[in-house]
Amino acid sequence: MQIKNIYFGAIRARYDMLAIVAVALFVLALVATPLFAEPGNDNRAPELTGDAEKLEAEAGNKVAFHAYAEGVQIYRWTGTAWAFVGPEAVLYATDNAGGAGVIGIHYAGPTWESAGGSKVVGQVVDRCTPDPDAIDWLLLRGASSGGPGIFNGVTFIQRINTVGGKAPTAAGEFVGQVVRVPYTADYFFYRKQG
């Protein structure tokens, strides 16, 4: 009987140790993932359907990070139409927990600049208009990038989930009048793999 108790005691001790190790590994995975992940980075491309499918980045490029933008689209009255001047926005890193932090700014060029100084300038490849009351969704190619930081090496940028930002429909009051129309958007930044 005593040998049987010793045997089962050893098995139970081993089981308890394995359970403790499994729990410790699970907790470590939960804690370590955010420590090593780039802000706003879950490496998943957005699901694009319908006309927006043409905004897919070229094969061989993978999402490096995702940012949320909040700002304005600036327009100037020419006397006959509102001419686009450029954007001014703050970029926020997004994460799965819903938290956010400022990672940079977005301005004319179009240019995205990180708080660390890296930049990428985009060139429009294609566009679509899922919401007629909001600015277009875009696919842009990274025409140039540089500086140490998150924007270095960016090859493609997608602007999707836009809200607002459209030019006014009413005529301006005088030539040269400038308006700043609020907008928000999600930006997905890609890098070439390999």
Image: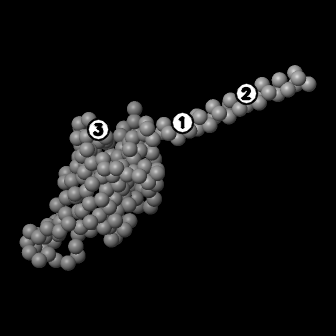
Question: Mark 1 = which residue?
Answer: 28
Q: In terms of secondary structure, where does tag 1 sit?
A: helix
Q: Residue at x 23, y 41 (%)?
A: 117
Task: Decide: is 191 above or below 10.
Answer: below
Horizontally, is 7 left or right of 69 in the view? right
Q: Residue at x 59, y 34 (%)?
A: 24
Q: Quadrant of residue 144?
A: top left
Horizontally, is 21 left or right of 161 in the view? right
Q: Amino acid at mark 3?
A: Gly
Percent across and percent down for residue 132 are: 34, 70
Chain-order first, disc 1 or disc 2: 2
Answer few, some or many: residues within 10 Å of disc 2's Cα (few below 14, many 20 plus, some between 14 and 19). Answer: few
Q: Residue furthest front?
A: 2
Q: Do callouts 2 and 3 mark residues in contact (Cβ within 8 Å)?
A: no
Which quadrant would the N terminus be assigned to in this image? top right
Chain-order first, disc 3 or disc 1: 1
Question: Mark 3 = which residue?
Answer: 149
Answer few, some or many: residues within 10 Å of disc 1's Cα (few below 14, many 20 plus, some between 14 and 19). Answer: few
Question: Mark 2 = which residue?
Answer: 14
